[in-house]
Image: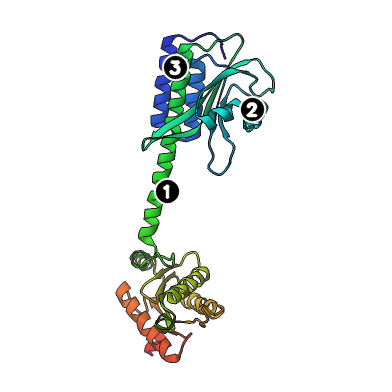
Amino acid sequence: MSTDRPDAQRQLAALTDAAAAIARGATLDATLDAILSGLAAAVGARAASVFLRDPDRPELLLTSVVGLDEAAAATFAAEAADPTHPVAIAARHVTAVFGRRGVGTGGAGAVVADVPLVVTRDGADLPLGVVSFAWAGPHEVDEADERLVRAAADLLAAAVDRAHLVSLVGERSEWFERVAHTDALTGLANRRTFDRVLELELARAGRQGGDVSVAVFDIDGLGAANQAGGHEVGDDILRTVAAVVAESVRLVDTVARYGGDEFVLVAPGSAGLAVAQRVLEGVAGLAPVQGRVVSVSAGVARFPADGTTAEELLAAADAALAVARARGAGSIAEAGVAAG
C-alpha cells in the first residue's frame, strides 16, 4: 500500500464509497471490509483494523483487517487484549490515541492512530469499538489525516450501529411473530395458529386423498386442582403437561393450547391415535406435580371418515373426548368407535 499522501479527489471518492457501503452493504463484515480498505488507502495507511466490543467477552474482538497477514493480525489481536495497550486505552477512555509502535510485530516502527467508534443514543455516547490505522516510515499525522481518520471512525460506527439496529428490529419482529402464534403460558401454538394449520392440512389432504387426525386432550381434574391449590398450581400443571405433549408428537404434527385445560393436535396421516396414545403415556409417567397425580383424557377424530371440515372434526373429537371422560381419567376414545 502506498505511503504517498493521496489527493483530495481520491479521499472524497473513498468517503463516498464508504457511505454507499453503509447504505447498501449486504453484511456487516463485508461493509466493514469495504469501508476499511477504501479509507486506509485514502489516508495512505499501510494497515488498518477494526476492533468491536463483544457483549459476551471483556476484550475487544478484531473484526476486520487490511494490510496484515493472518499471523500479524493474530499477534495484534493478542497485544490489544492487554488493558495497557493503546487500542484498549482508546476503547476504555473513548478517546483517540496517536503514537508510534509495532502493529502485529511486537516491535516499534509504525505511526499509529487508534480512534474510538462512538454513536450517540438518547443523548448518551455509546462506544462500539476502535479503528486503528498504521503508517510505515517517517509519516506524520497532520490535521488532514486526523480529520479523515475521525471521519472513518464515524462511518464505521454508523455501519456497526446500523447493523445492530437491523438485528434488533429482526429480533423484535421474530419475537412479535412468535407471540402472535404461541400461547404465553405453555409456549405451544395458540388457537389461531392451530385453526390455520388445520385448514391447510385439510386442504392438502383433500387434494391428495390423504388422512388427517385431530385429537383433543383434557387435563383430568384441573378445575379441582385450581380450587384446592390456586391458579399457580394449575398453571404449573398446564406447563408440565404442555412440555410432555410437545415432546411426544412428531415433527410434522402441530399441538396447541385450545382452551383453559384443553390441548389439541393436528396429525397429518393416519397415525393420530398412536400419537395421542403416546401423549397419554407420557403424561401418565410424570411425577406428581405440586403433590397431585396428573393425567389427561383424549378424543380422536379422523378426516374424512369423521368429518370433512374443521368444525366437524373438532365436534367429533369433542364427542369422543366425552366418551373417554365417561370411561375414567387417562382414557382415550376414537370418534368412529365412540359413535358406534
Q: CA distance from mark 2 to mark 1?
A: 33 Å
Residue at 40% from the left image edge and 88% from the top image edge? 323
Q: Which residue is mark 3?
A: 147
Percent position of residue 41, x then y: 51, 16
Query: Which structural element holds mark 3?
Result: helix
Residue type at the position of mark 1: Glu
Query: What separation in Å lies between label 1 and label 3 (alpha carbons)?
Result: 36 Å
Q: Is residue 75 above or below residue 234?
A: above
* Of callouts 2 and 1, the N-terminal one: 2
114 relative to 171 in the view: left or right: right
- Residue 222: x and y in percent read 42, 81
* Mark 2 lies on residue: 76
**Who is closer to the viewer here, 278 or 174?**
174
Q: Position of residue 101 (x, y in %)?
A: 64, 19
Say the numbered circle drawn on residue 171: 1
Of 80 and 135, nearer the camera is 80
* Residue type, mark 2 in image: Phe
Which amino acid does the dot numbered 3 rest on? Arg
Instruction: From the top left corner, tell me how far across and down residue 187 is, in percent.
Output: 44, 64
